[in-house]
Image: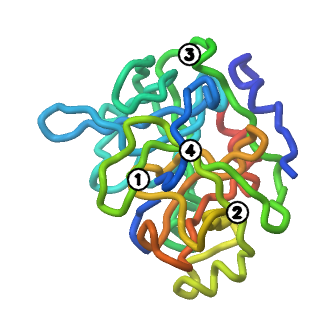
Amino acid sequence: MALYAWALLALVAAAVSADVSRVLDGQAVAIESYPFVVQVDFLQPGGVWSQACAGALISTKWTLSAAQCFSGASYPGVTHRRIRAGTAKRNSRGVLYTIAGVINHPDYGLAAPRDSDLSLVELSTLATLSSTIQTVSINVAGSELPGTTAVRLLGWGQTRLNGPSSLQLRDGIANNLALETCASRYDRGSITTNMFCTLSSSAEEQTSCQGDNGGPVVLNNVVVGLVSWGNGCVVSSYPAVHTKVSAFTNWIVANAV
């Protein structure tokens, strides 16, 4: 196995609706606090690049993000996406990386519209590590979040419904919600065991919104999830829904080589 993949082996045990998933009511943070978080830029009409999703650098070659960011009519190919690392400022500074290839999970969208919503994004050149660019570990295969564990959601998404995206990386705290409770609040069959849900720790509302998709959900600086979807942004009783990374750890390690 190539050296750049060794970070994937440092696994650390951690204790369709509207595609809107932001860090609401979070705090602005410096990239040094979470140097593994990256922006996923979309090439817009007119040749303008702008951040629209996020991801986590899991090795110097691979970024983990959401499959929805690399599929559908808005994704004609890798030339329309790039990765910006090493900066907390949206669309500014940092280091830009072109993309060599994308591997969406083969089960994406099969069991439910956003089931298996994860993608491995291969950088064209290896990332150079520094105080602002670091790799991160992913959760152990089969691990579950206990009870109402508090996790952190990271991203540059909208700070209010239909509002502007955050210009600074934000860190929001949310509590894990029992999957059965989450499933009871959505359409039957839309929540699967490959997902987990959160609600704000301060109120019965979501903590993510448009532009946060693919952003890492972390516990003790281990990626336990990826922001995926939800019903609106600040909608009381509708949780934010995330891809459960531990359901895909073996697939990630097998393919990010």
Q: Label 2 sits on what residue type?
A: Asn
What colouring style does the render use? Answer: rainbow
Q: Label 3 sits on what residue type?
A: Leu
Using the rendered view, name the quadrant where residue 47 is placed. top left
Where the N terminus falls, by quadrant?
Answer: top right
Q: Distance between the residues labelled 4 and 3?
A: 23 Å
Where the C terminus falls, by quadrant?
Answer: top right
Determine whether the residue tagged by mark 3 lies in a helix, strand or loop. loop
The disc at residue 175 is: 2
Q: Is residue 104 above or below residue 201?
A: above
Task: Give the residue number, with chain letter if any, for mark 1.
Answer: 159
Q: Label 1 sits on what residue type?
A: Thr
* Mark 4 residue crowding within 10 angstroms, few (<14) / some (14–19) / many (20+): many
Q: Earlier along the polypeptide chain: callout 4 or callout 3?
A: 3
* Mark 3 residue crowding within 10 angstroms, few (<14) / some (14–19) / many (20+): few
Q: Distance between the residues labelled 2 and 4?
A: 14 Å
Q: How far apart are marks 1 and 2 (CA)?
A: 19 Å
